[in-house]
Image (cartoon, coloured by chain):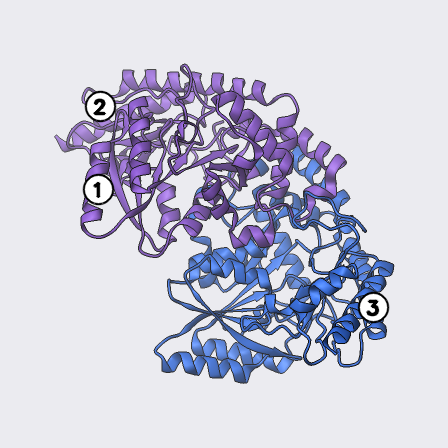
Chain colours: A blue, B purple
Amino acid sequence: MTSGPSHTQNTLRRGIIELAFGEPDPALLAVGLVRRAATAALDDAGPAMLAYGAPAGPPALRREIARRVAARESCACTAADVLVSGGNSQALGQVLTMLTAPGDVVLVEAPTYNLALGIMRDHPVEVVGVPLDDEGIRLDELQTVLGVLRAGGRRARLLYTIPTFHNPAGVCLSSQRRQDLLEIATEHGLVLVEDDVYRELVYDGAAPPALWALGGGAPVVRLGSFSKTLAPGLRVGWINASAGLLERLAASGVLTSGGCVSQFGAGVVGRLLAADGYDQHLAVLRRTYASRRDALAEALREHLPAGCSFATPAGGFFIWPTLPAGLAATALLPLAEARGVAFAPGARFCTDGDDRSLRLSFSLYDEATLREGARRLGAAVADAQAGRA
Amino acid sequence: MTSGPSHTQNTLRRGIIELAFGEPDPALLAVGLVRRAATAALDDAGPAMLAYGAPAGPPALRREIARRVAARESCACTAADVLVSGGNSQALGQVLTMLTAPGDVVLVEAPTYNLALGIMRDHPVEVVGVPLDDEGIRLDELQTVLGVLRAGGRRARLLYTIPTFHNPAGVCLSSQRRQDLLEIATEHGLVLVEDDVYRELVYDGAAPPALWALGGGAPVVRLGSFSKTLAPGLRVGWINASAGLLERLAASGVLTSGGCVSQFGAGVVGRLLAADGYDQHLAVLRRTYASRRDALAEALREHLPAGCSFATPAGGFFIWPTLPAGLAATALLPLAEARGVAFAPGARFCTDGDDRSLRLSFSLYDEATLREGARRLGAAVADAQAGRA
């Protein structure tokens, strides 16, 4: 797409290639599948879909999710392990409401998903960042933070982590660190809130196992979602966690009163998963987004000057280049916009204000537009270097 | 209906007339209207309905709500005065997250909607009850509570109130008290959270004006909903408030990240309101529920022993009889269940444990079943009186 509708969350600006927005291309949303499922579900089970629903979500959807998770992740999962959510943002809000107390420390990766920080700001918790490298969160740094907190008589309640196809950094937590992180969490009673929204969007090989699936008794709350694969507007996702944690989350007063937060959309998704078409749809997404990733990565290698570096992500939506020493992403942005390209500056994602990197999303545009975006970005970096010189 | 599907929020028990559940009769949900609107909206605006939506909700729905509110309540209302919610439970949770701080006092009516108390329990606030009489919340008691708090150096942040067709008490706040309450709220900076979910279900005359519509600059957050009129499972409602309060609520991190919490359902409702049929549907609901109310009230007058008293509500779903002196509703419940009828005991709705009343809903059953329920209830009260004697 090259111009955006004004009624979506992010409004595209004329003449600017907007690489800041981490949302699926509207042209790739599963409109046909949703339409078929919605009409079939309303015909067959209309009143049940439209009444107050069970707080944990429609049993049929919970069974379908459990079936898929068990098959695709080779782990045990039944409907009892699934709580339907209204997407990962709603789920994260619910986790914070139900599992934290005022003054608690919540750990995040630095960088982390910027809008998750906004959700945390609405709660009376203290957010502390732990650095990330090419293998995911640094566990030596995590141990240091936990030690400092303990020495001060405090404890971290949650760690919000995106171990698979990280937003914004694109990295995956290494296999060894997954095991080690689970041990640390068990030892410290630290609940790992695993944002796993990009798992199905894997372009090279297989996605690494989820922390939740590796399990081993560690306290993990895994947030899964259909927002990137079917449609964000459905507001349907799910939570996997141990029985005890799931029970605490399901005790939410909002669920007890209003029922499942996405009852209607959940009924549609349940029906959609029970029919054919989702796997073929996912295959199209993977092929399309992989090609876009390749186009953007290749063009960045061509157009970014020496001194810029980035890793090519194996899944997800984002490339996270680091700028040459001395350049700040926030200062680069107006120069880039003058050249007709935009991005999300690193400082938005970093609790410590680190601004050396920038987030580029390859989800929203076709290959030619992404290549042109990379060319403009390269020109903007050259402008910045010339201005500095 | 006489038996309930197990996948809805409340499961009916065989042989028991369940007068405890305050939910619409599934047979009266607007399945046809929703089906038509859903397919039309997906055909015409599929990707826009299914993408991340504007945090405040789809502009088309906000305009339709504003148009209806302005016309039906004879007040000024534009789309800018409307924030789409995921129903009143989600909205109340959002209000508590965004407008309270740890330790704040939240005032409620005594009795109040029991499941609202559950939503408040998830937040670090102190809940204090203020008694109600036949004209709604007692303002002398409210002044006393505010005075005690002030003397202790504290302030009440919010008052959660159901001034129109109260749940559970069925009463309406009188016209004079509406004016006086707005003055008190302005004077004390007390935000009135007006749960206005039953407004369209009025059976005698017109519903009194909303506190929000009376306005006059007082801080009012009015929660409106389509849960009782279209379908609870859509999870679509709205919030009206002054620009400042609406801005604070819309700044929610969950909205900023995920967009409108009920984007898909909101798209359907927007389309539905723009088409014909909703007003005719409301007329059917009013006629049907009014007849059920009459049947239950008449049968209660026949079957309840002397010493029981109740007012007949002019709207909403509930009759709230008070038992003869010496009888407690919670103790009556097993006797009633043995007779094949259930209700919600008063203690569930009262912050002070007052258990003299019971909530009966007339929304779920036809007239004959309601009459039989009243007969069984009368027999249970007689059982209790005999047991006591």
* Farthest residue, direction left: B389
* Count of numbered circles on the image: 3
Which labelled disc corresponds to residue A161?
none
Q: Which residue is mark 2?
A: B308
Q: Position of residue B104 (x, y in %)?
A: 32, 52
**Disc 3 residue type (three-letter):** Asp
Q: Which residue is mark 3?
A: A294
Q: Which label sits in the foreground, 2 or 1? A: 1
Q: Nearer the viewer, residue A30 or A357?
A: A357
Q: Nearer the viewer, residue A288 or B367?
A: A288
Where B302 falls versus B46 (above or below)?
Answer: above
Q: Label 2, label 1: how many angstroms apart (C-alpha)?
A: 30 Å
Label 3, secondary structure: give it: helix
**Disc 2 residue type (three-letter):** Cys
Residue at x-position 70% and y-position 62%: A334
Residue at x-position 26% and y-position 41%: B129
As drawn, is A202 to the left or to the right of B94? right
* Label 1: few (<14), some (14–19) or many (≥20) C-alpha neighbours in 10 Å: some
Q: Which label sits in the foreground, 3 or 2? A: 3
Q: Position of residue A90 (x, y in %)?
A: 54, 53
User: Tag 2, which chain?
Assistant: B
Q: Is residue A99 visible?
A: yes
Q: Which residue is mark 1?
A: B145
Q: Quadrant of residue B188?
A: top left
Q: Is residue B33 visible?
A: no
Q: Label 1, label 3: how many angstroms apart (C-alpha)?
A: 65 Å
Where B257 falls versus A139 (above or below)?
Answer: above
Where B83 falls versus A103 (above or below)?
Answer: above
